[in-house]
Image (cartoon, rainbow, N blue to C red):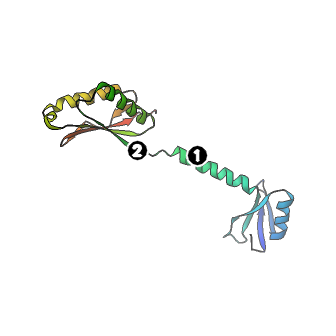
Amino acid sequence: MIRIPRVLVVDENGEQLGVLDTREAQTLAEDRGLDLVEVAPTARPPVCRIMDYGKFKYEQSKKAKKARQSSHVTKVKTIKFRPKTDDHDYDFKKEHIIEFLQKGNKVKVIMQYRGREMSHMDLGIEFLKELVEDVAEFGKPESRPTQEGRTVSLILMPMKGE
């Protein structure tokens, strides 16, 4: 696929073999059981390297996969409670919060009030304080609970070591 008549050739060990005819470089690569790959097409003369192209592509894909795995995007997960949330539901949702925090995500905990529950907002805030204590080893509050109309919200962030 290399159309230039003369190229600068670098062997598999990184040593320059000099400027050679393209056909001569290709036969040299074939004799070694490798491929001739153009690595710097804009250089004059273009630089070609003798390498195992399949292995090169495989290593590139492994590096790209590892880079994608190491770059974790923090998401904000939302869990809703009511002041009258039952113990079983509380435990179930608490386990989900712990799971999200262990994965490195932030969790927005929302306490929703309806009707007469609005007159007992202090119970909901105590409920949130208890929740923060229960998940203290996995995450900590980012800020104090904020009231927005009929809801009180709190954002928990994971511990640094996780």
> Which element is circle 1 on?
helix
Mark 1: few/some/many CA within 10 Å (<14, 14-19, 20+):
few
- The three-letter code of the residue at mark 2 reads Lys
Q: Which of marks 1 and 2 is in front?
A: 2
Q: In which quarter of the image is the N terminus?
A: bottom right
Numbered circle sitting on residue 75 = 2
Mark 2: few/some/many CA within 10 Å (<14, 14-19, 20+):
few
Which quadrant of the structure image shows residue 86?
A: top left
Work out whether 13 lies above or below 112.
Answer: below
Estimate the x, y position of residue 20 in percent, counting from the top left. 82, 69
Q: Residue at x 16, y 33 (%)?
A: 117
Q: Residue at x 76, y 67 (%)?
A: 8
Q: Of marks 1 and 2, which one's residue comes earlier in the chain?
A: 1
Work out whether 18 lies above or below 158.
Answer: below
- Taking depth in this image into account, of 16 and 1 the one nearest to the observer is 1
Mark 1 touching mark 2, by CB under 8 A? no
Number of dots carrying numbers? 2
Left or right placement of residue 66 versus residue 48 in this view = left
Work out whether 56 lies above or below 97.
Answer: below
Estimate the x, y position of residue 24 in percent, counting from the top left. 85, 68
Which quadrant of the structure image shows residue 76?
A: top left
Q: Which residue is drawn at 78% across and 53% down?
A: 13
> Which element is circle 2 on?
loop
Estimate the x, y position of residue 162 in percent, counting from the top left. 46, 33
Q: Distance between the residues labelled 1 and 2?
A: 20 Å
- The three-letter code of the residue at mark 1 reads Lys
- Seen as rendered, the residue at the extreme right is 31
- Taking depth in this image into account, of 6 and 89 the one nearest to the observer is 89
| Residue 24 visible, this orientation | yes
- Taking depth in this image into account, of 48 and 112 the one nearest to the observer is 112
Q: Which residue is drawn at 53% across and 44% down?
A: 70
Check disc 1 and report the residue beneath it. Answer: 66
